[in-house]
């Protein structure tokens, strides 16, 4: 079982006298608390997983590589990690189980591994930190990510990126190996006093004991450019091209790629005690045991199961529906579910903004990813000029209540000219022309 720290006992004692757990836990969150809590959630490319209170595991999202096929009799799990499309689980007895894609033998846990105290998963390789402070690796080794440096021992923590691996030694120094095309294993020579590490696809992060963060490697999306205001950090996480940090006050920061809104922290998110990052999505574990997820949702990887959502609001209505530079034919009303819009024929697309009544509700426009509170999307119109129906779905905070709206866009010609003008048995004084606006006739 995990070691129980003093703050953990303090929280339980305060809870017994009916003080608020969320407020206290967030206010006293330490690095070790955050590390332990972050082991309970993780995200892969298109799947996410979490540990339940009873030590079992729940997986949601894609199952195209059997990511959701949890091994039978998996129990007493203390830590989970997700690779690109495979997962590992560590049980309280120090044993590891793996499932999902096995394209590079990444789920073939070596026999005789011994007692494991930590696990990590790269895109297609897996790592295990043994109780003696040494590291084992299996799976893909295309960039040497599975070649453990000779003499590496005294390791306290491990993590893995797409094709590189990191180890944190007891002396607070970081060792890295594997792919280095983006300098992700070129650890800064002056980096010391490290207490936690994280690896993205091709970048690396280190949390120092003073609460500051160092980053190196790929930086095309700013994922390695740590914001100047970042301090007081107790945990870090890295996605493919974005980075996350958890502050001691229970709030979350993000930077880097935001193509799928993976760096848009949900409004009002607080009392967070653990964080994790998938390829293009993010997860946060709150003190009350609920999970919040945001970012890309093409396979349901941010659709957190009901059991991790809590009660929440059941308000699933829109507050407003707008189309940029256009006017809906109907006046918006929360209880009206269908709307129409007429635009000039040949209009390629419209920019639709849907605003939920409850900012914690998720808003999905067409086939785009759902967003919290407000979603703005550019929706292409049918090229043949036929009406384009745009479906808008609002999902309440409770994760169960939904409401659908439909906006149908009609394309109409902007040609307002006559083709001909005639008077029976008479001839106009002027020859008809499409650009002539006035005519006369004598009778």
Image (cartoon, grey):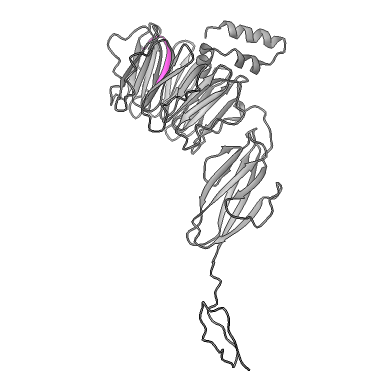
Which residues are the magenta region? 113-121
The residue at the point 49 percent across, 11 percent down is 92
The residue at the point 67 percent across, 42 percent down is 317
Q: In the rendered structure, does residue 117 fall within the stretch colored magenta?
A: yes
Quadrant where the C terminus is found in the figure = bottom right
Q: Is residue 430 visible?
A: yes
Q: Is residue 77 visible?
A: no
Q: Is residue 185 above or below residue 416?
A: above
Foreground residue among 54 and 214: 214
Q: List x then y, in percent, for residue 253.
A: 52, 25
Q: List x then y, in percent, for residue 43.
A: 47, 27
Q: Is residue 358 above or below residue 6?
A: below
Q: To which quarter of the image does residue 52 belong?
A: top right
The residue at the point 55 percent across, 39 percent down is 370
Q: To which quarter of the image does residue 306 belong?
A: top right
Q: List x then y, in percent, for residue 382.
A: 50, 57
The residue at the point 35 percent across, 9 percent down is 134
């Amino acid at each position: 079982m995990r070691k129980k720290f003093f703050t953990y006992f303090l929280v339980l004692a305060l809870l017994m006298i009916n003080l608020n757990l969320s407020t206290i836990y967030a206010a006293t969150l330490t690095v070790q608390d955050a590390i332990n809590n972050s082991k309970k959630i993780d995200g892969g490319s298109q799947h996410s997983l979490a540990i339940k209170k009873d030590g079992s595991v729940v997986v949601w999202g894609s199952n195209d590589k059997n990511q959701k096929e949890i091994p039978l009799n998996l129990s007493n799990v203390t830590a989970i990690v997700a690779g690109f499309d495979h997962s590992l689980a560590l049980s309280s007895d120090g044993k590891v189980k793996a499932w999902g894609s096995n394209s590079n033998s990444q789920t073939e846990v070596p026999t005789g591994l011994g007692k494991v105290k930590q696990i990590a998963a790269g895109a297609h390789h897996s790592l295990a930190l043994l109780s003696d402070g040494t590291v084992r690796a299996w799976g893909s080794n295309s960039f040497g990510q599975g070649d453990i440096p000779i003499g590496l021992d005294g390791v306290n923590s491990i993590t893995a990126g797409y094709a590189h691996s990191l180890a944190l030694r007891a002396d607070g120094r970081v060792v890295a190996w594997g792919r280095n095309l983006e300098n992700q294993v070129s650890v800064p020579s002056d980096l010391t006093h490290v207490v936690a590490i994280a690896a993205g696809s091709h970048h690396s992060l280190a949390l120092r004991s003073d609460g500051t963060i160092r980053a190196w490697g790929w930086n095309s999306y700013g994922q390695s450019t740590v914001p100047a205001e970042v301090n007081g950090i107790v945990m870090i996480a890295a996605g493919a091209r974005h980075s996350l940090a958890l502050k001691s006050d229970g709030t979350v920061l993000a930077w880097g790629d935001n193509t799928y809104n993976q760096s848009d922290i949900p409004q009002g998110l607080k009392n967070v005690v653990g964080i994790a990052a998938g390829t293009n999505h993010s997860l946060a574990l709150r003190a009350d045991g609920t999970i919040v997820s945001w970012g890309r949702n093409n396979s349901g990887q941010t659709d957190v199961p009901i059991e991790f959502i809590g009660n929440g609001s059941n308000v699933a209505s829109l507050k407003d529906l707008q189309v940029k530079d256009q006017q809906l034919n109907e006046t918006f009303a929360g209880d009206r579910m269908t709307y129409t819009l007429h635009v000039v024929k040949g209009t390629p697309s419209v920019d639709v903004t849907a605003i939920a009544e409850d900012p914690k509700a998720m808003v999905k426009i067409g086939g785009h990813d759902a967003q919290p509170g407000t979603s703005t999307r550019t929706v292409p119109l049918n090229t043949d000029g036929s009406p384009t129906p745009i479906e808008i779905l609002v999902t309440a905070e409770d994760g169960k209540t939904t409401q659908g709206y439909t906006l149908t866009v009609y394309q109409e010609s902007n040609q307002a000219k006559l083709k001909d003008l005639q008077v029976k048995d008479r001839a106009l004084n002027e020859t008809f022309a499409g650009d002539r606006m006035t005519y006369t006739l004598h009778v």
